[in-house]
Amino acid sequence: MDALKQGTDALFILLGGIMVLAMHAGFAFLELGTVRKKNQVNALVKILVDFSVSTIAYFVVGYAVAYGTSFFVGADQLAAKNGYELVKFFFLLTFAAAIPAIISGGIAERAKFWPQLMATAVIVGFVYPFFEGIVWNQHFGVQAWIKALTGDEFHDFAGSVVVHAVGGWIALPAVILLGARANRYRKDGAVSAHPPSNIPFLALGAWILCVGWFGFNVMSAQTVDKISGLVAVNSLMAMVGGTLAALLAGKNDPGFVHNGPLAGLVAVCAGSDLMHPLGALVVGAVAGALFVVMFTLTQNRWKIDDVLGVWPLHGLCGTWGGVAAGIFGSSALGGLGGVNLGAQVLGTAMGVAWALTGGVVVYGILKATVGLRLDQEEEYDGADLSIHRISATPDREVSW
C-alpha cells in the first residue's frame, strides 16, 4: 500500500507540473497577442528560454535555497519513493519559472535579451526561493514569529503572494528603470495608444492559463490524500467573478475581459483551500475590477509603461489575494478558519518589500553595468528583427 501511495503521489504531482508547464504557453501567447507585430517572435522566444534558464538555476541553486534539498547525489537516492522529490522539484520549478514569465510581459518591446536572462538566473536562483522557503518551508522561524504575534501563520496555499505578488512587484522597478516605449508618452502630455496586435492569440493565451491554473491550485496539495474539490470550485468562481467584473469595469474591452479571469485566479490562490465559493466569487470580482482600474491609472495617468499590466494583474491582485485569505477564509464569512487578517497583512507586506528590494537591486545593477534597453534603432525595427533576425510573418519567402 505504501508503494501504491508513493506512486500515486508522484503521478499526481507530475500531472500538476505538466499542467503548470502548459501555462507557460499561455504566458507566451498572451504576450504575443498584446505586443506589436514586430515583437511577436521575441515574446515566444523569451518565455521558452527564460523557462530553460529557470530550470538550471532552480535545479542547481534555487530548490536548495528554498527546501535544503540538493540533487548532487546518486541517481539511486533521487529515484527513492518513485522519484517523488524529483517530480516535486518539477512542479515547484513551474511556479518559480512563472516569475520571469510575469516580468517578461511588463518589459516587453524594448528590453535587451541577454540581460533579462541574467536577471532570470539570479531571481529564480535566489530572490524568489529565499521568500518561498520562508513561507512554505519554515525558514528562519518567520512563520513561527508571525504565529506568536498574531495567533496564526501566514497562509498562502497556492502562491497569491509567494509567486504572483512577488513576480509583479519585482517587475515594477524593472519597468520603471527600463522606461517607456518610444513615443508612448509625448511631450505635450498625449498618450499614444499601442493596441494589442492579435486579440485571438491574446485570448488563446488567457484560456491556456485558465485551464492550467486548476493544476496550479488543486495540485498545490502535492499529495493525493490532501486533494480538495473546494480548491477547484473556488478557483472556478474566482475566475468567473474576475471575468464579469472586468467586462463591466472595462466596458467590453476584450483585453480587459481576457485578463479578468487571470486577475481572479491570481487573487484566489492564497485562500482557495479555505474560502466558501461565494467568498471566492467576491475575491475574484474585486480583483477583476482592481486590474481594470489600476491598469488604466498606471498606463494613462502615472505613465508607467507596463505593457501587459503585470504589476496590476500579478502584483496588486496577488497582494489583494494574500489579504483576502484572511478575510474570506475566516469562519465568520463561511470559510474554514485557521487564518487571520493580521497574519495575512504582515506576511503579504513582507513579500512585497522583499520583491521590491530584489527588483531594484537586480535590475539596478544590470542597468548600471550591461544596460537593460535596446538602442533607439533596434527598438524602432522591433525586437524580432534586432535580436532574432526574423519577423513573425516574413514579407517575402525565398523560393528555389
Image (cartoon, rainbow, N blue to C red):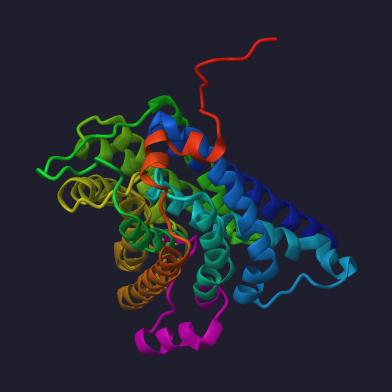
Q: Is residue 360 above or below residue 234?
A: below
- Residue 150: horizontal and vertical position, in percent? 35, 84
The main secondary structure of the magenta stretch is helix
Q: Is residue 236 or residue 74 the one in the foreground?
A: 74
Q: Is residue 392 above or below residue 322?
A: above
- Residue 64: horizontal and vertical position, in percent? 66, 74
- Residue 267: horizontal and vertical position, in percent? 37, 55
Which quadrant of the structure image shows residue 108? top left
User: Residue 119 in magenta?
Assistant: no
Residue at horizontal 70%, vertical 9%? 400
Any part of residue 93 in sight: yes
The quarter of the image holding the N terminus is: bottom right
Which quadrant of the structure image shows residue 67? bottom right
- Residue 284: horizontal and vertical position, in percent? 33, 49
Q: Is residue 88 left or right of residue 238?
A: right
Any part of residue 228 in sight: no
Residue at horizontal 30%, vertical 51%? 287
Q: Is residue 369 or residue 253 the one in the foreground?
A: 369
For the record, the magenta segment spans: 133-161
Q: Is residue 212 above or below residue 326?
A: above
